[in-house]
Amino acid sequence: MREKISTPLKTKEIIEKYGFYFKKNFGQNFLVDQNVLKNIVLASGITKDDFVMEIGPGIGSLTQFLGDSAKTVCAIEIDKNLLPILEDTLSGYDNIHVINSDVLKLDLNEIIKTYGNGRKAKLAANLPYYITTPIIMELLEKHADIESMTVMVQKEVADRMQAKPGTKDYGALSVAVQFYCNAHTDFIVPPSCFMPKPNVDSAVITLTLKENTVSVKNVALMFKIVKCAFGQRRKTLLNGLYNLGNFGLSKDELTQSLEEAGFDSRIRGEALSVEQFALLADIMEQKIKNK
Ligand code: SAM
């Protein structure tokens, strides 16, 4: 086991040695607290049989702990200036592979196939905050072969993922997360655990992919409806569907769909639960098919 780098002093030493500068536009806030790192690994339930994917290893603070706990780790880092540092801090770990790429440009299922040895991946990461939502949405919508994600995100984003219908935090991210996953916040992390310190509190949240989710005939249609529902939050769901949806249904047919689902035609999208979005999607799917 290698000496751990995740203290403020060692992190500072390493970045000075390599003349590294933090890049705000890559969301670079590195963890410098060993307890937080150990607790991320604990929350993710990683065992020696597991294949783990990390997005954004930074200088390798979390990666070292993942390498100690998992069978294989694949860490995807966009910043090529971090590669020589990772080579140094991860030397001695022959179970860790670093890929230099933008995670949003990769076919993650290919990577899981290549390195996972037939297993699904567990994701563990301190995510770059500027693209947390696109990363999570991409993983969920593209059905990446992932069984769970234990990720550090802004606390506000963790709250949005778990928000209930009718609250201000409830949105397309809440519906997607709750449709595909069981979610719970593991713990809250203050700015003092990072270098440099972010302006907000963070939270580690675990999303466990559901084996059986809410039944709906056309998932893509459901998420198109969800997009319309939150695209014009201040308008009624009917107007959102009519203005943004392009479903090939008239306003009357959309009104009928809402009424058949048991809603007042003036209802707002944010009032609908995941199950109710699924019900509406099934009714609209039938109407579209009957045309
Ligand atoms: N895991 C490290 C830690 O906890 O100390 C660093 C976490 S830091 C919040 C986010 C990391 O993601 C940075 O290393 C950053 O360069 C990397 N990153 C940012 N955008 C990325 C992208 N599109 N694809 C892959 N990595 C990215």
Image (cartoon, rainbow, N blue to C red):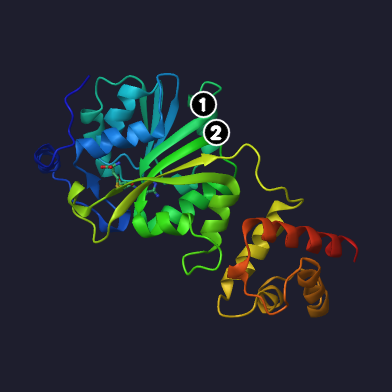
Q: Is residue 173 left or right of residue 256?
A: left
Q: Position of residue 169 (x, y in %)?
A: 46, 65
In space, the residues marked 1 and 2 are separated at their CA atoms by 6 Å
Q: Position of residue 62 (x, y in %)?
A: 28, 35
Image point (78%, 79%), residue name: 251
Verify CB contact (< 8 Å) between mark 1 and mark 2.
Answer: yes
Q: Is residue 235 left or right of residue 56?
A: right
Look at the image and tell me whether residue 60 can be seen: no
From this viewpoint, which residue is outermost toward the right?
Answer: 290
Quarter of the rendering occupied by the N terminus:
top left
Which residue, given by chain and number where applicable, does mark 1 sit on?
A: 114
Query: Mark 1 falls on what kind of element?
Result: helix
Query: Mark 2 falls on what kind of element?
Result: helix
Which residue, given by chain and number where applicable, does mark 2 sit on?
A: 110
Image point (76%, 68%), residue name: 262
Ligand 1 is within 8 Å of the C-beta of the residue at disc 1: no
Q: Is residue 168 left or right of residue 5?
A: right
Q: Is residue 278 left or right of residue 273?
A: right
Q: Quadrant of residue 249?
A: bottom right
Q: Position of residue 201 (x, y in %)?
A: 28, 56
Q: Position of residue 151 (x, y in %)?
A: 39, 44
In this rendering, the answer to whether 90 lies above or below 182 is above
Numbered tag placed on residue 86 in the rendering: none
Image point (8%, 40%), residue name: 9
In this rendering, the answer to whether 134 lies above or below 284 is above
Circle 1 packing at 10 Å, graded few (<14), some (14-19), many (20+), is few
Quarter of the rendering occupied by the C terminus:
bottom right
Q: Amino acid at mark 2?
A: Glu
Q: Amino acid at mark 1?
A: Thr
Look at the image and tell me whether residue 188 can be seen: yes
Q: Quadrant of residue 78?
A: top left
